[in-house]
Image (spheres, rainbow, N blue to C red):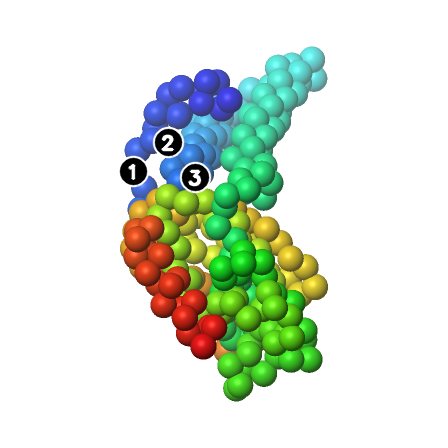
Amino acid sequence: MADRLLPPLAWIASLSWPLPIDASAHGPAVDHHLLLNLWIALALLAIAHLILLSGLILRRRTEATNLLRVEYIPLAALALLFATLTIKAERLWAATRYTGASLTALQIEATGVQFAWYFRYPGLDATFGITRPQLIVPAEGNPLGLDPTDPHASDDIVSSELVLPANREVDLRLNAQDVIHGFSVPELRLKQNAVPGQTIHIHFTPATPGTYAILCTQLCGLGHYRMNATLHVVSSEEFATWLAAHQKESTQ
Ligand SMILES: [Cu+2]
């Protein structure tokens, strides 16, 4: 909507900016909106200073009857502009990232714990097994507390790195075991808190194969600085190979 209202600014917004590369399908639209916001803020800053400067030079007293023209109309125009940008941002981000994952989306769970990320794939049965907090023993290879008596849990794959096939939608469910962590992959234009006691879904489609850093963006304790993991976006064949190799390990 803002593009249609402000074509010159939309054009300026399309100019390049030193952001990390864009490896997700939704990234270009988010970047475009971000840059449009920045250019509009820059233009408003320039206009405000020009008005300030002209006021200083002209030193003319404004009559009370002129308030509508000099204050209320510009204020209303600004409110309309920001409301338009906000609605567009809401549609780009909240409405598309949090609702409506397709039924064929790849189901993956990410769990933040001081100070690591764990990723779980549901395995051949496509169903996540039950986890129990009292069974969490990282030293014994059960950092998520998978219940061995649950048949759905036996084929679950737990990994400390995230491997995703390119161009397939991912429905990521985010958990935290202890405190609030922030799941962030700048190249995928993703950032979402993981909150203890909640499962938060966020869906996206990685588009460009490569290796990217997964960061924690919430100050979650003394080891926060080392709480990171690696994301590998690979071809669907490589993903199938990786999954098969880990499937064997988990069922052995
Ligand atoms: Cu953290």
Q: How many marks?
A: 3
In the image, which disc is placed on residue 122?
none
Residue type highlighted by circle 2: Ala
In the picture, residue 15 is in which quadrant? top left
Could you give the CA–CA distance between mark 1 and mark 2, rounded to whole angstroms?
A: 8 Å
Image point (41%, 45%), residue name: 168
Q: Is residue 12 above or below residue 31?
A: above
Please report contact status of discs 3 and 1: CB closer than 8 Å, yes or no.
Answer: no
Residue type highlighted by circle 3: His
Q: Provide the residue designation for mark 1.
A: 16
Q: Provide the residue designation for mark 2.
A: 13
Kindly tell me whether residue 36 is visible in this rendering: yes
Image point (67%, 73%), residue name: 132
The nearer-to-camera label among 3 and 1 is 3
Could you give the CA–CA distance between mark 3 and mark 1, rounded to whole angstroms?
A: 17 Å
Residue type highlighted by circle 1: Ser
* Percent position of residue 14, x then y: 34, 31
**Upstream in sequence: badge 2 or badge 3:** 2
Nearer to the camera, 187 or 104? 104
Could you give the CA–CA distance between mark 2 and mark 3, rounded to whole angstroms?
A: 17 Å
* Percent position of residue 148, x then y: 61, 76
Nearer to the camera, 169 or 238? 238
